[in-house]
Amino acid sequence: MTQAEQGNFSIEFFPPKTPEGAEKLRVVRAKLAELRPKYFSVTFGAGGSTQQGTLETVLEIRAAGLEAAPHISCMGSSRERLRTILNEYKAHGIKRIVALRGDLPSGYGAGSSSDELRYANELVEFIRAETGDWFRIEVAAYPEMHPQAKSPQDDLKRFASKIKAGANAAITQYFYNADAYFRFVDDAAKLGVTAPIVAGIMPITNYSQLMRFSDMCGAEIPRWVRTKLASFGDDSEAIRAFGLDVVTGLCERLLAGGAPGLHFYTLNQAVATTAIWKRLNLTV
Ligand code: FAD
């Protein structure tokens, strides 16, 4: 068994929105399957968008003989709708799920009906109540704090409550500061969290896209990394080479410091994840 299969090394996709996107993802998936990750996960659009695409993409991955985990989010979905989705996943023999609160697309409205679960810990409780131990459940963690949290301490407590509700493991939001991760893991352990906290990794390939995503999700780009990336201007080759060095170095530090695995946010691209994975020598 390779290190990637033994540890928690996983790869994330989003469901393609067009037939061309689906065809491209098939090629990307075949390339990334050569790395032999433990599983592929597929995101889920809160409030209805792309939800059928999540299941279709997961089923395609499984039909290729690979393990796949759909994400599920509670925001914008009634309990009845969640129950239907869970039963559908179960009927297909899916045993692994990533449980999130979700973010509603802008313009969707707050729409919190009394039937709706408000937070991910409630969703984990609901999944356990509905399906017992059928699913292995992963939840989200935020070493640099969730952007809507009251405080880092409050966010950490909320995180611990998801594990106590029955989650088996966590995947972090991406970050470029290894110390934030190590501190978060230590602080979580003090609250009794022993579940693995897998580090979420966003390869760096495009400066403006990275800045946009990071503004939205609250991930900090260290000043020296930002300045250097900005200095490359349109030189995408220099951005990719520098990004590869920075992110591989981060992964090395995380693994050396005891991170139980890595989860790659691929944005449905194969090249950068493959390059990092190979430099880390994970498929040996
Ligand atoms: P929660 O854990 O519920 O936390 C949300 C916020 O509420 C935090 O600020 C927390 O501190 C606070 N909070 C929690 N419980 C309480 C409480 N009881 N009272 C008061 N405050 C509370 N989004 C999608 O839409 N689809 C996806 O597929 C998806 N996949 C993701 C995968 C990963 C690995 C990660 C890290 C994120 C993903 N997201 C996805 C984004 C995620 O949905 C957002 O970050 C969302 O804003 C929070 O989700 P959560 O599950 O962390 O929420």
Image: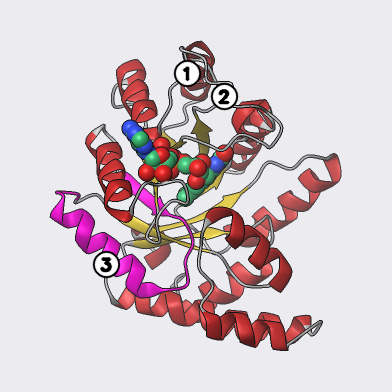
Residue at position x 47%, y 18% from top?
116
Question: Could you say which quadrant of the image residue 188 lies in?
Answer: bottom left
For the residues labelled 2 and 3, say whether their Cβ atoms are less than 8 Å apart.
Answer: no
Crowding around mark 3 (Cα neighbors within 10 Å: few <14, some 14 to 19, many 20+) is: few
Locate residue 58 relative to residue 3 in the image: left or right. right
Q: Earlier in the sequence, mark 1 or mark 3?
A: 1
**Which residue has dot 1 on it?**
116
Q: Quadrant of the N terminus?
A: bottom left
Q: Which residues are magenta?
A: 169-193
Taking the spot 14% from the left edge, 49% from the top edge, the residue there is 192
Marks 1 and 3, how far apart at CA: 33 Å
Vertical relation: 100 (above or below) 143: above
Residue ID for mark 3: 183
Foreground residue among 65 and 253: 253
Residue 153 % position (x, y): 27, 52
Does the beta carbon at disc 2 come under 8 Å from ligand 1? no
Q: Residue sitting at 37 percent across and 62 percent down? A: 261
Helix, strand, or loop for circle 2? loop
Callout 1 touching callout 2 (CB < 8 Å): yes
Mark 2 — residue?
A: 76
Report the side of 84 relative to 55 (left or right). Answer: left
Mark 3 belongs to which amino acid?
A: Arg
- From the viewer's side, name the closer residue of 142 and 130: 142
Inter-mark Cα distance, 2 to 3? 33 Å
Q: Residue furthest right?
A: 20
